[in-house]
Image (cartoon, helix red, strand yellow):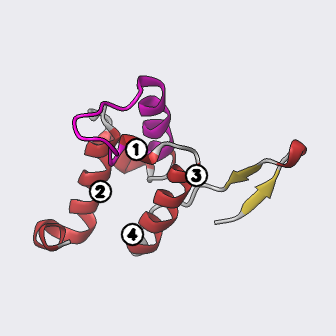
Amino acid sequence: MALVPKEGGSMSYQVPILTSVNYPIWSVKVKSIMDAYGLWETVEPRGLGEEPDLKKTKQALAFLFQAIPEDMVLQMASYTDPKKVWDGLKTWFLGVDRVRTA
């Protein structure tokens, strides 16, 4: 993950791309970037029963679709909830049994 300075002192983050072997590191990086942008709450809502804001949900989906390979985008395209995309990727790469224990 590279930090890229922008004018005005703000930072932008380079989106890591998921591969067949980098899921554990990819998930840590993506989670931290999404949290830095205030988007992680769309995956793991902070308050019980609290619905994330629609704009953030759309931003989170766009970010996740940018961070996965094109063939996976097509498989996840029917999901409109970033949590479902995140959970689907976790199940895909860790397997159902490992996700349950995690």
| Magenta-drawn stretch contains 21 | no
Instruction: List x then y, in percent, for residue 30.
Output: 49, 58
- CB within 8 Å, label 2 to label 4: yes
Mark 1 or mark 2: whose residue is earlier in sequence = 1
Residue range (magenta) = 43-65
Residue at the image position 88 percent from the left and 43 percent from the top: 8
Q: Is residue 82 above or below residue 101?
A: above
Report which residue position mark 4 lands on.
23
Q: Is residue 31 visible?
A: yes
Report which residue position mark 2 lands on.
89
Instruction: List x then y, in percent, for residue 23.
Output: 39, 69
Mark 2 or mark 3: whose residue is earlier in sequence = 3
Q: Secondary structure at mark 1?
A: helix
Q: CA distance from mark 2 to mark 4?
A: 9 Å
Q: Residue type at mark 3?
A: Ala
Quadrant in which the C terminus is drawn: bottom left
Q: Is residue 17 visible?
A: no
Name the foreground residue: 80 vs 55.
55
Report which residue position mark 1 lands on.
41
Residue at the image position 21 percent from the left and 61 percent from the top: 91
Q: CA distance from mark 1 to mark 2?
A: 17 Å
Q: Residue type at mark 4?
A: Tyr
Q: CA distance from mark 4 to mark 3?
A: 20 Å
Residue at the image position 51 percent from the left and 50 percent from the top: 34
**For mark 4, does the 10 Å Cα neighbourhood hold few (<14), some (14 to 19), or many (20 or more) residues?**
some
Report which residue position mark 3 lands on.
36
Mark 2 or mark 4: whose residue is earlier in sequence = 4
Q: CA distance from mark 1 to mark 4?
A: 20 Å
Q: CA distance from mark 2 to mark 3?
A: 21 Å
